[in-house]
Amino acid sequence: MVTSQAQLSMTLQVPPAGVLMKNQLWNVVLVNASNSNMLVKVNLVLLDAQTNQPVITAVSAPVSLGKGARQLQAKDVSPVQYTYSIPGGKIDMDPNGLLPAGRYQACYSVVSADKGNITWVENCIPVNVDPLSPPLLNTPANEDKLITPYPQFTWLPPTPLGLFNDLGYAIVVVEVLPGQGKADAIQQNVPLNAAVYTKDLFWNYPASTRSLDTGKVYAWRIVAMNSGKAVALSEIWTFRVTAVQPSAASVKQAPYVEVQRAQDASIATAGNVLRVTYNNAAADTSIKYTITSIEEPGNPVVQEGEVPVQYGPNQLQVPIKKNKRIVKNRVYLFRFTSSRNESWTVKFTVTK
C-alpha cells in the first residue's frame, strides 16, 4: 500500500493571492509514476485560516490518469459537487463564481475512484482572496480643516463587491500626538470611538461623545469586514477642527454623491448647492425632482424643480442657498423618477 501510494504525486498551481474564482482552485498537476492507468477523484476543503473551520468542500468527477504528468483544470474535473458551510444567501454558489474575501487554507486529497477508499496523496496551500481596491475615503478630505467638532465620515466600498458575502465597516478615529506619524497613531493610540461597526457608507461622530478639540490633529481609517473578519484597509487620512470659519475662497466644495435606487444607501453633505452624480441610462433630457423634509411631520416638500440631463453620466448641482425652508443640520431627501419609472434618491444635510 505504501509503495502504491508513492506512485502518484501532486503539484498545486493555485494563485496564492488576489481575486480568485472557484474554477482556479482546480489548477493541479498530477503525476502517475506507475505503468497502469489510475481512476481518481480530487477532494478539496477550503478552511478559514483563523478558525480552521471548513468554508467550502468539493469533490471532483472521476479523472483518468495515464502514465506521466497531467495538467488538470476545472473543465477536466467537472462536474464538481460543492458543499457550503456559509448560508446560501451570503455566498456566490455559481461553480464559476468568485470566492469570498478572506484568508484560507486549501487542502487537497486525491483518492481512488474504483479501488475503495484509498488516499493516494494529500497537500495544502495558503490562499488569500483580496479585493482589487480597498475602501476609498471620501470626507473629510485628507488634511482638511473642519468647522464642526462632530464631523461626518463617508467612504466608497471596496471592489469587486462580489467578493463579499457579509460586508461591513469598522471606523477608527484617533488623535495624532505631537511628533507622531499618522500610521503610528492608528496602530498605537486608543480610538476615540470604541467598537464602531456599520453596514452604511457613512458615519456621524456622535453628539453624545466628547467633541473633537480645535488645534489637534486626528487620523481616521476604514476597515472593510467580511463576515466579521477584516479583509481590506483604506488609506489613513488626517484632519483638524478649527474654531474659525475659513474664508469663502478657501472653503472646499462638498463632494459629489451618487444617487441610488435604494434609500439610505448614501448620504450627502450640502452647502449652498447639493451636488449629486447620476448615470442617465434612460436617455432622458431632464428630470423633475422634489426635496422633502424627513424630520418634519408629514414629510413636506420644501423644494421642487427641473434639471436638464444628458445621456450617460451627469454631475448635477441643485441650488438650495436661498431656500429658507431648508434648515442647517436637518436631514432631507432628494428624489426624482426617470422615464423608466425608476425612483432615485439620496439623503443630505446642510452644514453651512
Image: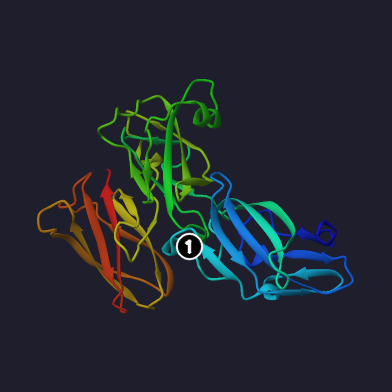
Looking at the image, residue 154 lies above or below residue 237: below
Q: Who is closer to the viewer here, 215 or 231?
A: 231
Q: Position of residue 263 (x, y in %)?
A: 29, 60
Q: Dividing the image into 4 quarters, which one contains the N terminus?
A: bottom right
Q: Residue furthest right?
A: 35
Which residue is depicted at the point 39% across and 55% down?
256
Q: Position of residue 70 (x, y in %)?
A: 81, 70
Q: Is residue 254 visible?
A: no
Q: How is the image coloured?
A: rainbow
Looking at the image, residue 91 lies above or below residue 221: below
Tally of numbered tags = 1
Q: Is residue 218 visible?
A: yes
Residue under numbered circle 1: 91
Judge left or right: residue 301 versus residue 279.
left
Q: Name the amino acid, label 1.
A: Ile
Q: Position of residue 52 (x, y in %)?
A: 57, 47
Judge left or right: residue 53 versus residue 300.
right
Q: Residue furthest left?
A: 297
Judge left or right: residue 273 versus residue 4.
left
Q: Residue furthest top?
A: 178
Q: Position of residue 335 (x, y in %)?
A: 26, 64
Judge left or right: residue 269 versus residue 114.
left
Q: Residues within 10 Å of mark 1 (few under 14, many from 20)?
A: some
Figure quadrant of residue 45 = bottom right
Q: Tag 1's secondary structure?
A: loop
Q: Who is closer to the viewer here, 291 or 184?
A: 184
Which residue is depicted at the point 48% across and 47% down?
224
Q: Who is closer to the viewer here, 47 or 170?
A: 47
Figure quadrant of residue 97 = bottom right
Q: Who is closer to the viewer here, 324 or 189?
A: 189
Q: Dividing the image into 4 quarters, which one contains the C terminus?
A: top left
Which residue is depicted at the point 60% across and 65% down?
58
